[in-house]
Amino acid sequence: MKGRRPGLYARFLPFLRWLPDVNRDRLRVDFMAGLTGAVIVLPQGVAFATIAGMPPEYGLYAGMVPAVVAALFGSSRHLVSGPTTAVSVVLFSSLSALAEPGTAEYVTLALTLTFMVGAMELGLGLARMGAVVNFISHSVIVGFTAGAAILIAGKQLPNFFGVQPAPGGYLDDILYQFVRQIPDINGHVTAVALVTLFSGLAVKRWLPGFPYLIAAMLAGGLAALGLNAAFGPEATAIGVVGRLPRSLPPLSMPDFSLETIKHLATPALAMTLLALTEAVSIGRSLGLRSGQRIDGNQEFIGQGLSNIAGSFFSGYVATGSLNRSALNYQAGARTPLAAAFSGLLLVVIVVLVAPLAAYLPNAAMAGLLFLVAWGVIDFREIRHILKSSRRETAIMTVTFLGALFLELEVAIFAGVILSLVLYLEKVAHPNIVRRVPDPGTPRRKFSSDPALPECPQLKFLRIDGSLFFGSVNHIEEAFARIEAENPGQKHLAIVAQGINFADIAGGNALVKEARRRKMRGGGLYLIHVKEGLLESLERSGCLEAIGRDRIFQSKTAAVAAIFETLDRSICRNCVHRIFRECGNVDEA
């Protein structure tokens, strides 16, 4: 019975698949990778909570229980879950209009939103909808992240320069308010922020093995202590984050009232799409490097359970973190235990260092967030998108501008909807290519060379794309145009190896064309028909209407059969003679 248990329960308890592979060496490596991740998430968690409008400790809580649950119930061996820049920005954008950031009401809304996101993720996973993220263009994430990064930096301008924050949350409001307060900039606060920023950049540049965010945080704190000692706290007016609770994540309870759920439904859906896309894309990216195949459905389940659990342990929305997951992989993690260790060890670290947050200046946090914002902009991918595809550039641009000037959940939906519309527009216009047998090749292979002559009675086309209701209009227009341009070509042969299926509308389009050509003394023929297309035509009854004798699986058989139906008087006067059979016309 014990030998059969992993196979029996693996779907519901996926950690049973890899747990037997854990040995002493792997345990040691995973522990060290987890310790590294726990140290890194300390400044990040506080920074992300600040972005999200949550008390600083909640960013740390979001990296504890959710990280452990996602590791045990997900499918990736390297993905580390926790708070991220993108979800933190969306959380603030979604909730700041409903409650004052940092208040108990705001926190309750955040916990409720987290539960709703987890429930949606879990539902999608159980419904085997893991492929849904494949329909969300990567350009949506790239554009959204770049816009969110600029918004993060803009929101930290008051803390960076020691001025009053803008009442509005939009970028134009923030910049307008900041420009008005330039004469009021606090030089001491700005100095602390600059020390934090440049020390982080220096450590990242010249000491890449050292956690640069921790170095920047320490440098900013020491700069504030030095300025306070030299000029006095009253003169410098350098605010601090404040002491963090020195405890385990406390139990919490979301608000399940119908009114609250109604207000949070749209943000929850937007954040679910964003969080799942982040998690699965990061997991697959690391899976390509490690040779692991990611199960999207299981990852949905793992992310869903982690957020549901996090909502009851004071954690806000968590998802896969790119920098912590990449660090986990680079640190040599072998199993998901490394991510679980990261969450557990963070508890220990928080208990030890929480009092030190009383000395962390808000200006240093602003410098840290400038570093975070710069780091999440994928300049290489932006350049790649700009060079390679106008469609993807449009998707990225719309999402980017939406993130700057609209509500962030609206920006996500706009990018997703545009990517789907452009995808459907492309699918609805399958490529239709003229094909001609090439007499210059030994077997007269089909070619698209425009210089090659066509048979005056027979037209060959290749359609690359399925025949469904969205593409029928484009295909029928192509048929009508071809008939108008070449009225003598009464016979039409479609090379169908690029057609996977035809729905009822697509099948009816073929039937209508077959009947129209038959009335004119010609015919419609299908060559190289895939099994899927054949089955769909048969189920819809279109196969009989077209004629089973008009279906061919080889070009040679099709040409031989169609040639017998051609008008011999036209063949005798034809000078092209593009088929082998044309050589026998004069003898006949």
Image (cartoon, rainbow, N blue to C red):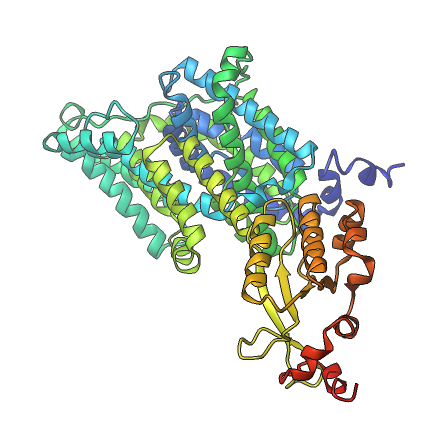
Indicate whether 513 appears above or below 37. Answer: below
Residue 392, horizontal then vertical, whole percent: 44, 51
Q: Residue at x 62, y 85 (%)?
A: 575
Question: Which quadrant of the figure has residue 403?
Answer: top left
Q: Nearer the viewer, residue 280 or 251?
A: 280
Question: Which quadrant of the figure has residue 124?
Answer: top right
Residue 233, horizontal then vertical, whole percent: 18, 25
Residue 195, horizontal then vertical, whole percent: 24, 42
Confirm whether residue 84 shows in the render: no
Q: Quadrant of the N terminus?
A: top right
Q: Residue at x 22, y 28 (%)?
A: 238
Confirm whether residue 576 shows in the render: yes
Q: Nearer the viewer, residue 422 or 436?
A: 436
Residue 116, horizontal then vertical, whole percent: 56, 23
Q: Which residue occupies the extreme right position in the image?
A: 1
Q: Which residue occupies the extreme bottom position in the image?
A: 587
Q: Nearer the viewer, residue 380 or 64?
A: 380
Q: Is residue 312 left or right of residue 579?
A: left
Q: Residue at x 15, y 26 (%)?
A: 232
Q: Quadrant of the C terminus?
A: bottom right
State how many labels appear. 0
Indicate whether 128 appears above or below 201. Answer: above
Indicate whether 484 appears above or below 370. Answer: below
Indicate whether 87 appears above or below 286. Answer: above
